[in-house]
Image (cartoon, coloured by chain):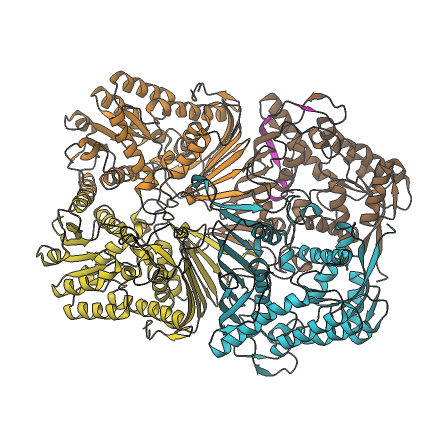
Chain colours: A brown, B yellow, C orange, D cyan
Amino acid sequence: MSKNKTLRIGLIGCGFMGRTHSNGYNRIKNFFPELVYQPELKAVCSRNADKVKAFAEQWGYASTETDWKALIARDDIDAIDICTPNDSHAEIAIAAAAKGKMILCEKPLARTVAEGQAMVDAVEKARVANTVWYNYRRLPAVTLAKQLIDSGKLGKIFHYRANFLQDWTISPELPQGGEGLWRLDVDAAGSGVTGDLLAHCIDTAMWLNGGITDVSAVTETFIKERVHQASGKVQKVGIDDACIFHCHFENGSLGLFESTRYARGHKALYTFEINGEHASIRWDLHDLNRLEYFDHRDDSIVRGWRSILVTDGDQPYMKRWWVPGLSIGYEHSFVHQAADFLKSLETGEPCHPTFKDALETQKVCEAVIDSANTRSWKDTNVKGWLK
Amino acid sequence: MSKNKTLRIGLIGCGFMGRTHSNGYNRIKNFFPELVYQPELKAVCSRNADKVKAFAEQWGYASTETDWKALIARDDIDAIDICTPNDSHAEIAIAAAAKGKMILCEKPLARTVAEGQAMVDAVEKARVANTVWYNYRRLPAVTLAKQLIDSGKLGKIFHYRANFLQDWTISPELPQGGEGLWRLDVDAAGSGVTGDLLAHCIDTAMWLNGGITDVSAVTETFIKERVHQASGKVQKVGIDDACIFHCHFENGSLGLFESTRYARGHKALYTFEINGEHASIRWDLHDLNRLEYFDHRDDSIVRGWRSILVTDGDQPYMKRWWVPGLSIGYEHSFVHQAADFLKSLETGEPCHPTFKDALETQKVCEAVIDSANTRSWKDTNVKGWLK
Amino acid sequence: MSKNKTLRIGLIGCGFMGRTHSNGYNRIKNFFPELVYQPELKAVCSRNADKVKAFAEQWGYASTETDWKALIARDDIDAIDICTPNDSHAEIAIAAAAKGKMILCEKPLARTVAEGQAMVDAVEKARVANTVWYNYRRLPAVTLAKQLIDSGKLGKIFHYRANFLQDWTISPELPQGGEGLWRLDVDAAGSGVTGDLLAHCIDTAMWLNGGITDVSAVTETFIKERVHQASGKVQKVGIDDACIFHCHFENGSLGLFESTRYARGHKALYTFEINGEHASIRWDLHDLNRLEYFDHRDDSIVRGWRSILVTDGDQPYMKRWWVPGLSIGYEHSFVHQAADFLKSLETGEPCHPTFKDALETQKVCEAVIDSANTRSWKDTNVKGWLK
Amino acid sequence: MSKNKTLRIGLIGCGFMGRTHSNGYNRIKNFFPELVYQPELKAVCSRNADKVKAFAEQWGYASTETDWKALIARDDIDAIDICTPNDSHAEIAIAAAAKGKMILCEKPLARTVAEGQAMVDAVEKARVANTVWYNYRRLPAVTLAKQLIDSGKLGKIFHYRANFLQDWTISPELPQGGEGLWRLDVDAAGSGVTGDLLAHCIDTAMWLNGGITDVSAVTETFIKERVHQASGKVQKVGIDDACIFHCHFENGSLGLFESTRYARGHKALYTFEINGEHASIRWDLHDLNRLEYFDHRDDSIVRGWRSILVTDGDQPYMKRWWVPGLSIGYEHSFVHQAADFLKSLETGEPCHPTFKDALETQKVCEAVIDSANTRSWKDTNVKGWLK
C-alpha cells in the first residue's frame, strides 16, 4: 500500500498509560488498514534506561531516549504522546508545540486551569494537531449514546448522573507518591479522584449533554496521613479521596457526580445515566458492550429498559472487530482514539477532545475543588460548549 | 351489597397449600369487591382436631371437620377445595363430585392418568364447576406473556424452554414421607419433581404454546435410600430427584424442560423462554414482576431485550393492587385464581385449567416418566390443545 | 384465643395509604396470630359519605364518620391512623393526642419542623404510643441490612448513597392539587419530592447510618405552572420536582441523595448503597426481596457481590410467609409495621420511627429545602441519633 | 532478547478464524514477552491471490501461497494453522503431519469420528505438537471455573447444563454454502449447530466435568430448503438448525445441552452452569469477564450468588492485561491459546485440547447426531476422560 504515510510517534512514559497507548497504535494496521496515516513507533522515552529499553523491545519502538527534551528535539518524530504524571504535562506539551510537534496528551490535560490555558495557547500558536486521551468516549456503547442523544431521541434533558467508584486505597498501609502511586501525591497529580476519575465523567457528560455552568461540591480525605514512597516519611495526604458534586448544565438539566476510591466492592465502576423527556440511557464500564435504553414511546404494555448488546456491525466501530455478540474490552477505546486521531490528519478536522475541549473539563474540575474548599457554589465559566 | 352471593367453601388440608388458598379467598373482598360471588369460609377439614381448630381460627373458617367424608356430606358447602397430598385427590374429588360439589383441586390433578381420567369423568358426569390450582398462570407477567403470544407478536414459534430448579433435598439426612415431606414419598406423591415442579412448567407451556406431542426423558434419583418418617426405617427412594426432557409441540416447535431439587443455589427458580420468528419472551419466578421481551422489529441499533416491570394498571391484574412500580408477590397468584374462579361462576365460562386441561398435563407427566423408565421416546396422546 | 386483646382503630383517609394500612391490619390475624393485641377496624373517616361507606364495606370497617373530630371523640377507638394529606397531620394528631388516642401517622410527619415539633410535644405530653409509617424499614431485605450493619460486618462507613426516581409528572398536562394529585400542591404537601420521596430515603439512612449533620442541596421545578384541579386555573407550581443533596453523617461518612419525578423509565426506583471498610450493601425497591452484599474478607479469587434472595425463614419476617424462594411484595411492609406496632403494645417499647424519630427526618428535609433556596450549606441540628 | 526462538507459522484460510488466530499471534510479543518461542508469521495461504495478499499485508505475514500443498512443503515453516472449512481439516492435517509440521487446527477437529481418528493417528505417528482451538477454555472466567472445580469447592456434581443460542439464520432468504456461509452447507461443515456450537459446549463440559458416556438427542431443521450460493439452485438443507440433548457424565451427573440459530434475541449466548453438592458456578459469554458462584457454606443469612468480576491479577491470565475492573474481550481467548501453545513447546507438555482430546468431543457430536436420527440413546464410547 504505497499510498500510506506514517505518523512517527515519540512516546513519553512507560507506565499503565504508556502500555494502553502503545497497544492502541499497534492494532491500527490490523483493524484500520485503510487509514492513510499509519503509526510508526519511532521512539519511547523514560528516565530509566533499562526499563525503557525493555519497553521498547516489548512494544516495538525503534529507539529509546531517557531525556524528554532530547526526544522532542528529534527531527524524525512527528507527534509526541505524553503519558507522564500530570505535573509534567504542561512543560512537555508547551516545549513540544514549540518544536512543531503534534501532541497526544493523556488526561487530565493538566493540574490546573492556568497550566491548561498555557497548553492551549501553545498548540494554537504552533497550529499543531492535538488531542487528549479521554478514551471512554470511544467505547462503542458510549458513542452510540452520543448518536441517540444527537438524533433527538431523548427530547429535552432533565437529569444527568455519573459516578466512578473504586476501592483500591482503603488500606492506610498504602503509601503515597512514586512508582505506580503518584496518583495519591497531590504535587504530582494536582488532585485526587477529581482529576483522575471525575475528569472522565465530566468529559463524557459535556460531550453528551453540553456545558456545566456551576457546581456545588464536597470532598473528603478519609486517610489523613500516609508514608511517602520518596521520602519514606509520614506526610499529610493532599488529595481528595472522594468527591461529590451537583451542578447545572447549560440546557437546564441537573447534574450529579460522585467519585471515590473508598467504595468497597467496586473496581472501576464508571456509570452514567441521562433522563430525557422521551427516553433515557444508562451505561456501565463493568459491562461496557451494553447500552441500556428506555423509550417511553414504546407501547405501554411492553415498555421497558432495553439491554442493547453493542456488538453489531451497524453500531459504532464494531464492523472493525468480530461478529455480532462477541465483545471487545477496555483497551479497544484507545485503539479507536488512535484511529480517530490518524483519520483527523486525513480530513483536517480536529480530533475531539482537543486541548481546548479538555480545558473546559479542567475548568469544571477546578471549580469543583474550589467549591468544596469554600463550601459554596462556583461558576465554571464554561460557556457555549454546544454550538 | 345485597347483590352479592356467597360461595361456601370447604377446604381439605391445612398444609402449605391450605394456607395459600385460604389467603387467596381472604383477599377477595378487599381487592375484587365487585365480584357477585364472594367466598365464605364455611369449614376446614384435617385429621388432627387441635391443628384444624387452630387453622380455622387463624384463617377465619366458621367450623371444622376431621373426616373429609363428613365435610363433603354437608349441605352448607358449595365447593370443595382439595389441598391434601396427591394420593387422595382422586378419591376425594370423585366423592365430592358425586355430592354435586364444585371442586378446586391443588395440582397436580392426580398421581396417574388413570386417576385423572376418573376425576374428569366424575366432574363431567356431575356437571360441576372445577379448576386446578396451576397458579403461576395468574402472575401478571405470565398472563402478559400469554397476551403477547396470542396477539401474534412472536410469529411462528421455534423454541420453548423451561426449568424449575430447587436445592432443598441435597442432604442425605433429610427423611422422606410424613408431615411436610410427603412430596419425597412416591406413594403419596406419585412422582418427584415431575409431578411437583415440571407439572407447573408443562401447564404453562401448553397454555402458552399448545400441546406437547412426544417426549424423550431422563430421570435420576441421586439419594437412593432415606429414612421414612412414618416407619422410622431406611427405605428405597421411589421418586425422581431430577428430570429432564425434550419434546415436540403440535406447532412444530422444540421444547426443553428440566427440573431438579439438587441445583445448589436455587430455591424456586422457575423460568421459561419462548423464541419466535419475530420476538422472544422470558420470565423468572425469582423476579416475578418482570417480563423480558425482545422484538426484532425494533430499530437495529437500539434493539435489545426489554425488561418490562409489570406493575402498571394496564397490565394484567395490576389495576387491583397499588401504583406503578410497586411489586406484588407469590401469594397473589392464588388471589387471582380464586377471583377468576368466582368470576367464572358469573359468566358460566370454565375457569382454566379445568380438570380436563390438567389431565392433558398429567398425560405429559406420565409419558415423561415412562420415557425415562424405558429410555425411549413416548407419545403423549395430547391432541388439539390449541383449538 | 381468649387471651387476645383488641386495638380498636379509627382510620382517617381513604386514599392510597388508607388502602395499604387497611390491608396491613387485615393480614395480622392470618400471619401474626400470636400477637396479644389484634386490630379491630372500628371506624373509617372521610368527607365523602358514599365513598367512605364503600371503603368501609370493602375493607371491613364497622362504622364510618365524615368528620375526623367526631371520630377522635369516640370512646370506642384506641388508636387513630392518619392517612390524610400532609397539611392536616399536625392538627389531627395534636387533637387526637389530647383525647388520649394512640397515633399511627402516615409519613412525612408534617410539612415543617414547627408542625412536627408541636406533634412530638403533644404525644409526649399525652404519653400515647405513636409511630410514623416509614414502611420501607420493614421490608425483609432492608431489615437484614440493618442487622448486618449493627453486627459490625461493614466496619467503618465511608459512603451512603440513595435515590428515589419516578417519572409520572413529566407531562405538562398533568394538573396539580385535589383528588390523587395533592402531592403536587405545595400547600397540601409542604414540599415535592423532598417530603414525599427523600423523606423515605432519609429515614432509612439515619436508621442505618446515624444522624445527618449538614446538607448542601439543589432543587428544580421543571414545569413552572400547572392547572390547579380545585380552581381550574393555571397556577405557579410551588413544589420541588427534583432534589439532590450531599451531606455529612455524624460518623464521618459522606451522603448523597437524589430524588425526582422526571427520570424517564423509573416508576419507583428507591435504591440505597452503603460502603464500609470491610463490606458494602445495596438494595433496590424494584427487586425488593433481594439484598446485594460484598464482603472484602472473602477469598480474593471468588470475591464478588452476593445476590441474597431474602426469602428464608431465618431472615427478617420471612418465617411468617411462604417457603424459601417465594417472594413477597410492597404491601407486606405495612403488614410488618402494623405487627410491630401491635407487638410494641405488649412490650412497652416504642415502635420506631416514633414521632420523635420522624421529627429528625423532618429537620433534614427542612434543611435541604432551605439549603437549596439559599444556595448554601445548612446544619440540620440532628444530633445523637446513634446513642 | 537473543534467547528467543521463533515458531514459524503458516496459516491456511483468511476468514473469520484466520483473523482471530492472526490477532492472537500478533499480541504475543506485547503481552507474553517472556515466552521463549515467539511466533513469526511466515506465510498465509488462500486460493484467491489478491485476497491473500491483502490479508498478508494487513496481518503482517511475510509471504503468501495459494495452494496449501505448497505451503506445507516449505522448509521455513514450523507449524501449520488450519482455518479452512471443516471438510478440509483432515486432508490438510494428515498431509502436514506427514511433513513433520506442528498443527494448530480450528475446531471442530473434523466432520466425523473417522476423519478425526485418522488425524489423531497422523499426529501421533509423526509425533508433532498439536492443538485444537476450543478457545473458550482460555477466557479467564472459564479457567477460574476449572480451578474452582479441581480444587474440590463444588463437591460431588449433580448437574451440568449449557446452551449456545444464536438467531442469525432465521430468514429463509439466507442462502447456504460458499463465502461466509459454508457453515450452512452440510458437505462443508459436517453438521449444523452440533459441530459449530455444541462442540464448544461439549469441550468445555468434558474439561470441567469429565467424560460424557451416553446421549439422547433431538435435532430440527426449521428451514428445509435454501438457495445454494455455489449452484444458485434451491437445495435441501442438510444441517441441524437446532439440537438438544441430555446425557450422563462418567461421574454420575446429568447433562443438558441445547444449541440453535433460531433463538431470536441471542447473538452468541454461550452459557453453562454446574451444580455441586456444596457450590455452583455459572457463566455467560455475553458478560465474559464475570463468573457467578454460589457457596452453600457461606453464612445462611448472607448466602447468595456471587458476581465475580474476573479482572484481578491473581485470577487466570489477568496479570497480563490492565488493572482490576478493566475488561478484556472475546479475542483475548485466542491470544491465551496461542501463548499456551508456545509455552507448551518450552515445557514439552501437550497443549490441551490436543487432537486426541478433540476426538473425544467428536465422538460425542457424532453420537448426538446418530441419536437424533435414530430417536434412541447412544453410547459415546468416551471413557476415562478424567484420569
Residue D347, image quadrant: bottom right
D290 to B204, vertically: above or below: above
Identify the residue at horizontal 46%, vertical 77% (top origin).
D375
Locate the C terminus of chain C by quadrant.
top left
Image: magenta residue range: A206-232
In this view, the residue farthest toward the left is B75
Residue B340, image quadrant: bottom left
Q: Position of residue A37 (x, y in %)?
A: 81, 54
In this view, the residue farthest toward the top is C125
Residue A228 lies within the magenta run: yes
- Judged left or right of residue D34, residue B61 is left
| Residue sitting nearer the eye, B145 or D346 | D346
Locate the N terminus of chain C by quadrant.
top left
| Residue sitting nearer the eye, D42 or A120 | D42
Residue C76 lies within the magenta run: no
Q: Position of residue C339 (x, y in %)?
A: 28, 34
- Judged left or right of residue D313, residue A105 is right
